[in-house]
Image: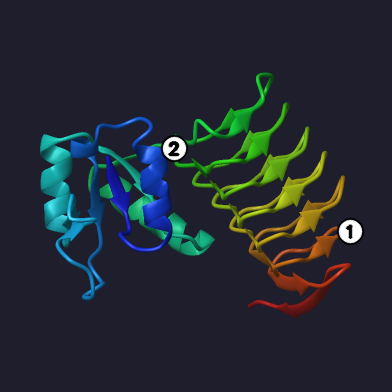
Amino acid sequence: MLIVGAKGFAKEVLEVAIEKYKLEDIVFFDDISNDIEDKLFNQFQILRSEEQVKDYFGSNNKEFTIGIGNPKLRKVLSEKFKIIGGVHVSLISINSSIGSFNTTIEEGANIMSGSVITNDIKIGKGVLINLNCTIGHDSILGDFVELCPGVHVSGYCTIGNEVFVGTNSTILPKVRIGDNVVIAAGSVVTKDIPNNCMVAGVPAVIKKYFD
């Protein structure tokens, strides 16, 4: 198992990875940080180049996960590591709760400890559901959505692709959120949000649009 990234969130992903993989089967990738040692926690090898990754995939497990936040960056990294031979897999904490009926999770999701996903829910590719989030029934999360810790998504919600939802935000029932949206921390989203904008506040209002 290759964890892309070797700082910050990657250290939390490690805790989920060791629920499934042997310690000796886990390595990291970081080609930009000059302030870290060759081994994370003096134990886990850190690969430094794409050539090393290709060699690793050629002789080891091809599975990888992304230990970095930011929806757009996660999408780019997913595509990059699949091109060089990797298989993007989901890591789901045993300390999360996943509904038993008609809930689907596509490839590359990271679902962290304490999160609750109920029934009749679709989770798209590369989604990051961080610590202690909840997702209510009949909701859809698009590809590469990121829910920061403590986010609560109510029932019948639809969230588009590459949406970032800040810490402790709440999305009320039946709200539809477009693609490429940023929701600031602590916001309460009470009505539909269009594509390509940033919202904040209680209730959340549009603060700016993106090109």
Q: Can residue 67 be seen from the camera position used here? A: no
Q: Marks 1/2: CA distance? A: 31 Å
Position in image of residue 34 (x %, y %): 21, 75
Outermost residue toward the bottom in this view: 208
Q: In terms of secondary structure, where does tag 1 sit?
A: loop
Q: Amino acid at mark 2?
A: Leu
Residue at the image point whose x is 62% and y is 55% from the top: 149
Residue at the image point whose x is 53% and y is 43% from the top: 112
Work out whether mark 1 precedes mark 2 in sequence or the reverse, and give the earlier one: 2
Left or right of residue 147, residue 94 in this image: left
Q: Amino acid at mark 1?
A: Thr
Report which quarter residue 186 is drawn in.
bottom right
Report which quarter residue 90 is drawn in.
top left
Measured along the vertical axis of the image, is residue 58 above or below residue 97?
A: below
Residue for badge 1: 190
The colour scheme applied to this rendered structure is rainbow
Outermost residue toward the top in this view: 101
Position in image of residue 19 (x %, y %): 38, 32
Residue at the image point whose x is 60% and y is 41% from the top: 114
Position in image of residue 205 (x %, y %): 84, 72
Depth order, front residue of 84/36 = 36
Crowd tier of the residue under label 2, counting other residues whose Cα lies within 10 Å: few below 14, some 14–19, many 20 or above: many
Position in image of residue 164 (x %, y %): 62, 61
Q: Which mark is residue 91?
A: 2
Crowd tier of the residue under label 1, counting other residues whose Cα lies within 10 Å: few below 14, some 14–19, many 20 or above: some
Q: Quadrant of the N terminus?
A: top left
Select label 1 or label 2 by which is in front.
2
Q: In terms of secondary structure, where does tag 2 sit?
A: strand
Depth order, front residue of 45/107 = 45
Left or right of residue 31, residue 105 in this image: right
Residue at the image point whose x is 87% and y is 45% from the top: 174
